[in-house]
């Protein structure tokens, strides 16, 4: 049918409005667009991060240099994700080093994440470290979603802080206005009292 139409009806296509032809083409290729991937690509483009992949397991002698390296990378102001797949076990010093990094980088906003952390190592963290600032990502496929949700929650938190600060400022201004009004009333009262004190008794009776 398409070949027949192109062979014998091409001359009549000239009279079809371009908008109509465009609508026909869009309808023909619309099913070819994967709508689900748009959201994923949008998240990925907004969430840039740096992947850290140690070549060896982290033990006591390398902890200090490792922490210094991570802190220097943190200056780039992007999320740091450390692939912990190679970590079969961690000693006490290594766990405390990661705990210190997490506390420094995640106290204000989440910037340091641990990916593929072994379940045995997770148990060691539960026993030896304070997990308040430890941030975990189970699968690499979840990175975009985790960072996106974290950024969204951080924005909401900042909005709530801004609203609270705005309300506090408004209350402070209201209190200041009330104080000025109260002082003004007090000054007026004192002024009236002074005027009455300077009046003679007869003038006071007339004033009353």
Image (cartoon, rainbow, N blue to C red):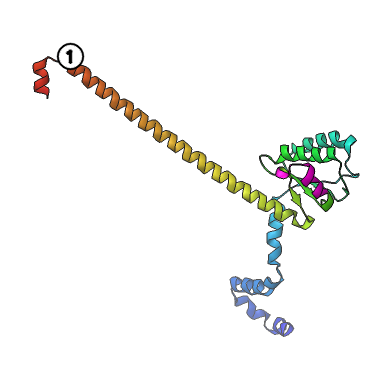
Q: Is residue 161 magenta?
A: no
Residue count near mark 1 (Cα–Cα under 10 Å), binned few <14, some 14–19, many ≥20: few
**Chain part drawn in magenta:** 121-132
Q: 152 or 200, which lies in front?
A: 200
Residue at 80% in and 38% down: 96
Q: Is residue 90 above or below residue 34?
A: above
Q: Is 161 on the left-hand or right-hand side of 9?
A: left
Q: Quadrant of residue 184?
A: top left
Residue under circle 1? Answer: 198
Q: Secondary structure at mark 1?
A: helix
Report whether 116 appears left or right of 135.
right
Q: Position of residue 163 (x, y in %)?
A: 51, 43
Q: Say whether residue 156 is visible.
A: yes
Residue 111 visible? The answer is no
Identify the image quadrant of residue 178.
top left
Q: Where residue 13 sits in the image (x, y, percent)?
A: 64, 78
Q: Specify whether 197 is left or right of 168.
A: left
Between residue 51 and residue 110, name the one nearer to us. Answer: 110
- Viewer-proximal residue among 19 and 71: 71
Q: Is residue 196 above or below residue 65?
A: above
């Amino acid at each position: 049918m398409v070949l027949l139409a192109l062979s014998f009806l091409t001359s009549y296509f000239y009279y079809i409005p371009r908008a109509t032809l465009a609508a026909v083409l869009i309808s023909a290729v619309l099913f070819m667009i994967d709508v689900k991937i748009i959201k994923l690509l949008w998240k990925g483009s907004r969430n840039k991060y740096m992947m850290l992949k140690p070549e060896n397991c982290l033990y006591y002698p390398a902890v200090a240099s490792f922490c210094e390296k991570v802190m220097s990378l943190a200056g780039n102001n992007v999320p740091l994700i450390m692939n912990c797949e190679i970590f079969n076990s961690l000693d006490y010093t290594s766990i405390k080093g990661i705990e210190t990094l997490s506390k420094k980088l995640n106290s204000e906003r989440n910037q340091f994440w641990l990916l593929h952390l072994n379940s045995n190592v997770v148990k060691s963290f539960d026993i030896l470290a304070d997990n308040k600032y430890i941030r975990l990502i189970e699968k690499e496929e979840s990175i975009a979603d985790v960072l996106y949700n974290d950024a969204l929650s951080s924005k909401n938190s900042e909005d709530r802080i801004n609203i609270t600060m705005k309300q506090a400022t408004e209350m402070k201004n209201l209190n200041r206005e009330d104080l000025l009004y109260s002082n003004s009333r007090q000054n007026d009262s004192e002024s009236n009292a002074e005027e009455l004190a300077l009046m003679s008794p007869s003038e006071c009776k007339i004033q009353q």
